Amino acid sequence: MLSNALLFLIIALIAAALGFTVLSGIAATIAKILFILFLIVWILSFFKKG
């Protein structure tokens, strides 16, 4: 999940550099959502093990 978030972040950066603002915004939003989901799952698994 974290690797997918990083992939969409890279896509967003490349799209922004090339001037594709809509694609960049969509990819950045997907990256944020995946990163937040990763953090939630990581925190839940951290507390479940302890």
Image: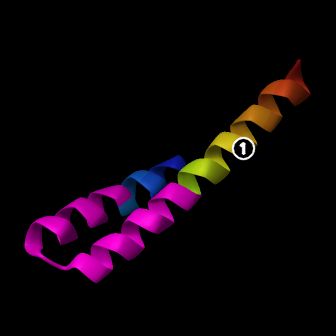
Q: Quadrant of the C terminus?
A: top right
Taking the spot 20% from the left edge, 71% from the top edge, the residue there is 15
Give the number of callouts.
1
> Is 47 rendered above or below residue 3?
above
Residue 5: x, y in percent? 46, 55
At label 1, counting other C-alpha atoms closer than 10 Å, the crowd grade (few under 14, some 14-19, many 20 or more) is few
In the rendered structure, the answer to whether residue 44 lies left or right of residue 31 reads right
- Does the stretch in magenta take in 24? yes
Taking the spot 70% from the left edge, 36% from the top edge, the residue there is 42
> Is 9 rendered above or below residue 46?
below
Taking the spot 64% from the left edge, 41% from the top edge, the residue there is 39
> Is 50 rendered above or below residue 7?
above
Label 1, on which residue? Answer: 40
Q: Which segment is the magenta one?
A: 9-33
The prevailing secondary structure element of the residues shown in magenta is helix
In which quadrant of the rendered view does residue 23 lie?
Answer: bottom left
Taking the spot 29% from the left edge, 72% from the top edge, the residue there is 24
Residue 17: x, y in percent? 11, 65
In the rendered structure, the answer to whether residue 26 lies left or right of residue 50 reads left
**Amino acid type, label 1:** Ile
